[in-house]
Image (cartoon, rainbow, N blue to C red):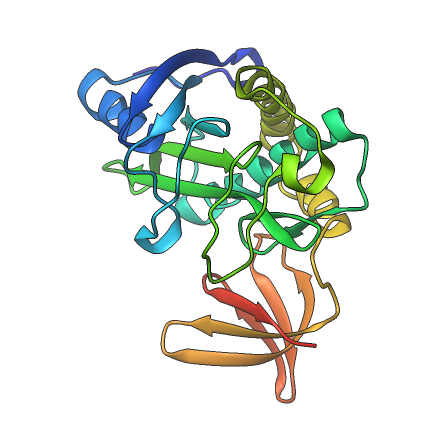
Amino acid sequence: MDKPNHNQISFDLVRLHTVSSTNEELKMRAINENAPEGLAIASTIQTSGKGRHGRVWESEAGNMYCSVLLRPNCDLSRASQLGFLAALASSQAIISYTGDLQKLNLKWPNDVLLNNKKVGGVLLETINNKNKSVDWVILGCGVNLQQHPMQTAFPATSVIRELGIVIEPKEFVNCYLNKLMEWYKVWVSQGFFPVRSAWLKMAFNLNKKLLVKAGDQNIVGIFQDLDEEGALIVKTINGFSKVNAGEVYFHD
């Protein structure tokens, strides 16, 4: 397969009514049909929507559920940065409707918060090729526009609940994909630095105390920064710790 020309990429959106999950639908097309970079799947309903670590993502009608297939031709550590692009794109899409930046924040690694409650999330899945570089990335994103789950470990909400604004998913997904395209081209041409800078401006509880559960390790300290690859930098009593994956909990 020829390498994609990222400067000429465009998103080809397929709208469906019901799927098990947009990530699974796109994964099947990537594996069975060798789908091209830029294919996007949006669905009105997901019957088996999922989040990170296999968690259930409640997926009623009225929200955005969208997955995009990318072929970035890079290693896994760099491909993981794409989750930051989706978080930025979805938050900026919300801002384009509401005009209110102050109430939106980004929580490491992949959550979009509105009034300190989760309104969106990102699920990134990859497969490597024989050269151990990433063959493709499926970048899934869900945004609670009109519905939200009621019983969650971290408080959840929707745009309509917090702001009283009705946003139609079919319109919103177009805005989101336009923003994502802009950030993808920036990332390809300029690297992670501008993405990191934009993300940090919206970072939730930067310079605040946190607990990170990374495997069987608990790290307590201050949320200091992101490194040049997107890892969380935590200032602890013993110095600085770099966290590539984990669950973040903030404390007063």
User: Relative to 103, is 223 above or below?
Assistant: below
Q: In the visual, does 216 lie left or right of 87?
A: left
Q: Residue at x 58, y 56 (%)?
A: 108
Relative image position of residue 159 (x, y in whole percent): 64, 36
Q: Residue at x 59, y 40 (%)?
A: 158
In this rendered view, identify the residue nearer to me: 2 or 163.
163
Give the quarter of the figure containing the N terminus: top left
Q: In the visual, does 189 lie left or right of 245?
A: right
Q: Residue at x 69, y 46 (%)?
A: 199
Give the quarter of the figure containing the C terminus: bottom right
In this rendered view, identify the residue nearer to me: 103 or 110.
103
Q: In the visual, does 28 lie left or right of 94?
A: left
Relative image position of residue 6 (x, y in whole percent): 52, 19
Total count of labels: 0
Relative image position of residue 223 (x, y in whole percent): 67, 69
In this rendered view, identify the residue nearer to me: 249 or 70.
249
Q: In the visual, does 184 lie left or right of 201?
A: left
In this rendered view, identify the residue nearer to me: 186 or 65.
65
Q: Residue at x 73, y 37 (%)?
A: 163
Q: Residue furthest left?
A: 32
